[in-house]
Image (cartoon, rainbow, N blue to C red):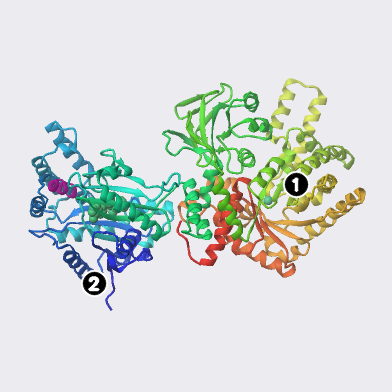
Amino acid sequence: MRKKYVYFFDEGNAEMRDLLGGKGANLCEMTRIGLPVPPGFVISTEACIHYFENGKKFPEELWDQVMAALARVESETGKKFGDEERPLLVSVRSGAKVSMPGMMDTVLNLGLNDETVETLSRIAGNQRFAYDCYRRFMQMFGNVVMEVKKDLFEHALSDLKDKKGYKYDTELTPVDLRELVDTFKGIVKKESGQEFPSQPLKQLEMAIRAVFESWYNPRAITYRKINEIPETLGTAVNVQTMVFGNMGENSGTGVAFTRDPSTGEKKLYGEYLLNAQGEDVVAGIRTPQPLEKLKDELLEAYDKLAGIMDTLEQHYEDMQDLEFTIEEGKLYMLQTRVGKRTAAAALKIAVDMVEEGLIDKKTAVMRIDPSQLDQLLHPCIDPNADFQVLTKGLNASPGAAMGKVVFHADTAEEMGKAGEMVILVRWETTPDDIHGLVQSQGILTSHGGMTSHAAVVARGMGKPCVCGAEEVKIDYASKSCRVKDVVIREGDIITIDGTTGRVILGEVPLIPPMINEDFRRLLAWADEIRKLGVRANADTPEDAARSRDFEAEGIGLCRTEHMFMAEDRLPHVQAAILAKTDEERAEPLQKLLKMQKEDFAAILKAMNGLPVTIRLLDPPLHEFLPNLGDLRVEVAELKHRGASLEELAAKEELLANVRTLSEANPMLGLRGCRLGITRPDIYQMQVRAIFEAACDVVEEGYEPVVEVMIPLVGIDKELALLKESTEKVIHQVFEERGIRIGYKIGTMIELPRAALTADEIAKHAEFFSFGTNDLTQTTFGFSRDDAEGKFIPEYVELGILEKNPFEVLDTEGVGKLIDMAVKLSRQVRPDIKLGVCGEHGGEPKSIKFCHQVGLTYVSCSPFRVPLARLAAAQAVVEEEREVFIDK
Ligand code: ADP
Ligand code: MG
Ligand code: MG
């Protein structure tokens, strides 16, 4: 059977994007609903795929089908290829399923040669017009199809203008243009070794082949890689009758949007140029006019266009971006597609369209790209601003910030308190810098990764942060830094963009965050739809309050180690760790108990009535101790200085202590529940602090909902043991206070063994929270900080990994463990609560996975809560529709 490769515009429709490409499918759709589209046909993507699968040969049936379609175009237009009376000219346009800049440029005016140009000139009564078309055609065809460098044509054009003393292209006379055409022919001959083809059919065949070939041009390949477009799609080819916007002052061409793509406002929005062809509007040769003005110049065409824009919106039920051309007063439609828009516009359009009855709430929820929401929650750099990027680092915490550069936390604190905006620039930050971080607008470090101190703290505080900007060379002594050959001194202004990692010298206009009514309404619809709960990771009362603002349904992870890091606590923490006996340890622990209690009370109050999962201490102890190397230096210095024996002995003892505690591989060493078992008094103190705090707030009339989470369990007995000792403390407290409060005890699943034996572990756990950061590390055997810096980018480049598994959950491996643990645990405890508290809990694709495996909730940083609510709703709609939604 003969396969169909060619579709006349009335044989396709908008659903046929796979086969006809986006542009082709929509040209068909517009034709189908009776809009004025110049006749033409689409060569399917299957023809392109066939071409590459068969040694670059057209399918056998193709040419006959092209000829038949062409004959139909000729009969519909009354024009003929190469005709002496009424020559047909066409455009040849590429068009893949997804719009892809970087594909072949369009060839306009195909069909012109030395004879037809004369005919065209005669019919139009306009020699200048005809030769202008001809020279454009030679330029485009020469470049795109025959691969002659663009510059050569451009130079020939400007040489001619210089010679004649012209400033504008429009000054060229017909005689000049004729001369130019000859020059172009010469250029093509010389550069390609071939004559410029004069046969229209030959031109057409060459152009079709060139469109196919462009699928694999380097620009297109790169674009596909960046945007994850499959190589296998292939491109369609659109062949369409030319209409001329360059026939004089009652002709023109333009682009339009059915709503304002930056604000979403419902109004006609666009630009046009009179007496112009094709892409003159976007090329910036002349300044285009706002669409409104067309009303005064060509009223009839304007009214027609306004009507069509309305029709298109009603028909597609979405904002459209379209191309039109007016030939001697008559309007033609040349393209329509769903228009790109800013996050703010996307929200407004979605909400307005529900209001107008055009779409339903589910559709509205699907229209917003969750990762775009970030744009609305943080200040961001004005996309229209003009600036130069000095260097780039890691986009560690989203949002843009601007301020005076300072290099020391003390200076940041001082200036910040005085009301100045500062950006703290450090090689890396440590817990000692907290007071400066608090007072800064943003943080820039030249070292450290996505989990470095600066990154974690900044994300927690919701401050913009760029990390690991290695080109920034800091000299603390002179309070300056150098980036390439630019020197930045303390007090100089920089702007950092934590959403992209950009660092910019000087001020850049920022757009403030925008949580408006549209935002709230759309998220409320998402809440109606979603099944997955959304909680926040919050370690402080401020974070807890913010979580509530973003309507988190509880705290999924409250880490207690950040409380330990605070300046006023670290000495007690160190004393507790270094104490040699239980008695010695009791006093510092008592002090910590009091402080932790206050923290917990404040958080439980802020989250009144909502669950708060508090994780007992997780990191290895030496993280709280002075650095081993520093201590060695200090001891050496003391010796050198001849310090007192006592002083030296104390330091040496500290050194010895720290050395004993230091581990070859702390991530896999004495941490989490292992610490809880071998040093029981720390966990006991924490549990006591939690429940004394809970009792306190109950007495104040609050309703605390506590979940105690024990980290890093890999063996069920670990949890059994710790559960028992935890409950003992809890009951002691209840006893002492004469109060009883409901609570849950559960564990993190962050080791493969925990997932593999989840049924055993679930016997002792009322909830699981998948710690997907650690679970990813331990499943892959990657240490995140090393892996992200050293080889993951290369792995992604080589295609070994599709994505960085620390950003997007590895559903095949880590996800399989999660799925297994879900099933195993529900076998023994059907009502077990299952959550995710790794960073994946705030990443749309990972959230969809969490929905699919049936988790109870995801927990993410407060600022990502809105994104998670939206993504969780989309997961439901996608499941219902069972379709893959294009990005
Ligand atoms: P792109 O995908 O780069 O926009 P197009 O194929 O849409 O490329 O075409 C480029 C320009 O040429 C657009 O301005 C389009 O409107 C114009 N154009 C394409 N085909 C025709 C035609 N048959 N008649 C007049 N103008 C055309
Ligand atoms: Mg276009
Ligand atoms: Mg962990």
Query: Is residue 351 found left or right of 832 in the rendered image?
Result: left
Q: Amino acid at mark 2?
A: Glu
Q: Can you say which quadrant of the picture contains the N terminus? A: bottom left
Mark closer to the chain start, 1 or 2: 2
Asked whether residue 136 is drawn in magenta, I would say yes
Magenta span of residues:
129-137
Instruction: Please provide percent x and percent y for residue 6.
Output: 27, 68
Dot 1, crowdedness within 10 Å: few (<14), some or many (≥20)?
many
Identify the mark at residue 308; answer none if there is no mark. none
Instruction: Please provide percent x and percent y for residue 717.
Output: 79, 60
Query: Is residue 772 found left or right of 831 in the rendered image?
Result: left
Q: Residue at x 24, y 50 (%)?
A: 326
Identify the mark at residue 617; answer none if there is no mark. 1
Instruction: Please provide percent x and percent y for residue 161.
Output: 15, 35
Dot 2, crowdedness within 10 Å: few (<14), some or many (≥20)?
some
- The quarter holding residue 65 reads bottom left
Dominant secondary-structure state across the stretch colored magenta: helix
Asked whether residue 515 is drawn in magenta, I would say no
Inspect this view and state whether residue 384 appears. yes
Residue situated furthest bottom in the rendering? 1
Identify the mark at residue 61; answer none if there is no mark. 2
Q: Secondary structure at mark 1?
A: loop
